[in-house]
Image: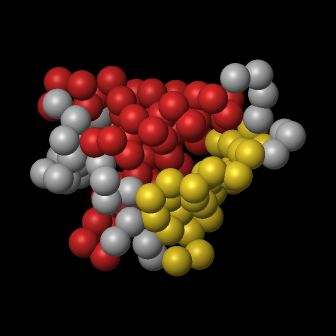
């Protein structure tokens, strides 16, 4: 899924940096995703395998993503062997969350 047409206009990350950021998320999901669920249309829950430096990596990505895409709300719950990452959006950005869920599932299947 290299097409970035799903990235909303409200994203302030410079266009040339977007593929790099998407690649960072894809790599994290490909390496660490253990489970994904969508109990509500506006929320995505990811479970990521823990390990050395993983929590810091997740927090760094979340902080940078929050800086350019303020419509995302991220909540992390680190554990010993698992990091839970909840991602929420408002109704106007449900399609963005749909696209993120599809990318996450595709990246997780590479694992």
Give percent across and percent down for residue 86.
Answer: 57, 58
Q: Quadrant of the C terminus?
A: top right
Residue positioned 33% across, 41% down in the render:
67
Q: Quadrant of the N terminus?
A: top left
Give percent across and percent down for residue 64.
Answer: 39, 35
Residue positioned 38% across, 66% down in the render:
89
Residue positioned 22% across, 35% down in the render:
13
Give percent across and percent down for residue 61.
Answer: 48, 34
- Can residue 9 be seen here? The reply is yes
As drawn, 42 above or below 25: below
Q: Quadrant of residue 63?
A: top left
As drawn, 49 above or below 38: above
Most foreground residue, 76 or 43: 76
Give percent across and percent down for residue 102.
Answer: 43, 53
In the orientation shown, which residue stands out farthest toward the right? Answer: 80
Residue positioned 53% across, 49% down in the render:
105
- Can residue 26 be seen here? The reply is no
Identify the colour scheme used: secondary structure
């Amino acid at each position: 899924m290299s097409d970035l047409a799903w990235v909303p206009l409200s994203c302030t990350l410079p266009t040339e940096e977007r593929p790099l950021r998407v690649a960072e998320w894809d790599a994290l999901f490909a390496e660490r995703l253990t489970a994904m669920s969508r109990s509500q249309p506006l929320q995505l829950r990811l479970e990521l395998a823990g390990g050395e430096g993983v929590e810091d990596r997740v927090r760094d990505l979340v902080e940078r993503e929050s800086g350019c895409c303020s419509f995302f709300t991220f909540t992390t719950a680190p554990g010993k062997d698992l990091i839970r990452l909840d991602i929420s959006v408002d109704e106007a950005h449900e399609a963005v969350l749909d696209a993120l869920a599809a990318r996450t599932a595709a990246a997780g299947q590479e694992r």
